[in-house]
Amino acid sequence: MSMIQIYKKGIMTADDIRAELELNMFQPVNIFDACIRLGVSVRFVDINMEGVYINQPGGVNSTILLSNRRPLPRRCFTCAHELGHHIFKHGSKIDALSNEDHKGSNEMEEYLVDSFAGALLMPIAGIQAEFKKRNWVISEASPIDFYTISCVFGTGYQTLVMNCKMNRLLNETKTFELLKFTPAKILKSIFTPSINTSYFKIIDRHSQLSLIDLEVSNYLILPPDIKIDGDHLKKYKESNIGTCYLAVKPGIVRAATTDSSSSYFIRIQNFQYIGLAENRHLETLID
């Protein structure tokens, strides 16, 4: 099977899983919730690696282990990658993902599950729709534009840029230009003096998300007319793109516009949480 055939197989299988989850080609998928719905347990553990897929006979009660030391978007891609091993019945796997080309006898399997993960998390139709609703031209969009779209799909900035390049939405020159920026540089361009964080999320007026996942210590930038219940998020400062909040404790809180025209829930898990994914937002931890 050629690499193109493998890539197409990954995309088609991702489409099938979206249909099973009753998601269209425009909706972001919360990968942790999706795994639970598909009968795969997800657990965060304190290990210095990316992830592990533990296969059980018949695929029943199979488990994905994710390192709690990685930034949240990276955990999302790793989780989708490990779910790919489950869907394609590859058996138990220990993965140390990297940006390097896959080598060795498992090259085809790894390329297949990476293709599946990218298509599941970042459907091309969805990416194009998010840029279009903001009147942004993909080939001309800024790093902050791309970062905002990556927040919609819960993926990393560089991951989104490379996915767009792979699907010919970006040329080599624009890709190289965008990859000069990192999330840290983008954050520094928003705030002066800069703030240090492993992850921050931008939610603008066009982001139609019912759920927003964060981790304690993460920053969240929201439109200025959003009101948040509870004390789980502490207002940090204003910026030219919205109001910035710091996640200070785990839990689930509601956020809504002042006119109640839109609302969503913000789910915050504890810093480097250890335990089952379905319990990650509980203020009193249950394992």
Image (spheres, helix red, strand yellow):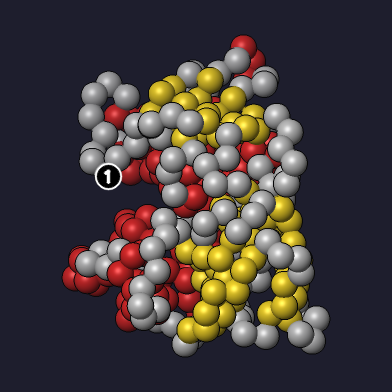
- Left or right placement of residue 269 versus residue 79 in this view: right
Q: Residue 229 occupies which quadrant of the picture?
A: bottom right
Tell me where residue 38 appears, x and y as whole percent.
Answer: 68, 35
Q: Tell me which residue sits at (25%, 64%) in the image.
A: 179
The answer to whether residue 54 shows anywhere in this view is: yes
Q: Tell me which residue sits at (33%, 65%) in the image.
A: 184
Tell me the quadrant of the picture where the N terminus can be found.
Answer: top left
Amino acid of disc 1: Asn
> Relative to the observer, which residue lies in front, 178 or 173?
178
Tell me where residue 48 appears, x and y as whole percent.
Answer: 38, 31
Is residue 4 positioned above or below 231 on the image? above
Q: Tell me which residue sits at (71%, 65%) in the image.
A: 231
Q: Residues within 10 Å of mark 1 (few under 14, many from 20)?
A: few
The answer to whether residue 143 shows anywhere in this view is: no
Q: Secondary structure at mark 1?
A: loop
Q: Residue 264 occupies which quadrant of the picture?
A: bottom right
Give the farthest residue toward the top: 57
Tell me where residue 188 appears, x and y as whole percent.
Answer: 34, 74
> Relative to the observer, which residue lies in front, 109 or 282?
282
Tell me where residue 77 appears, x and y as whole percent.
Answer: 46, 45
The residue wearing badge 1 is: 99
Q: Tell me which residue sits at (47%, 87%) in the image.
A: 240
Is residue 72 positioned above or below 170 on the image? above
Give the farthest residue toward the right: 260
- Left or right placement of residue 256 versus residue 197 in this view: right
Tell me the quadrant of the picture where the C terminus can be found.
Answer: top right
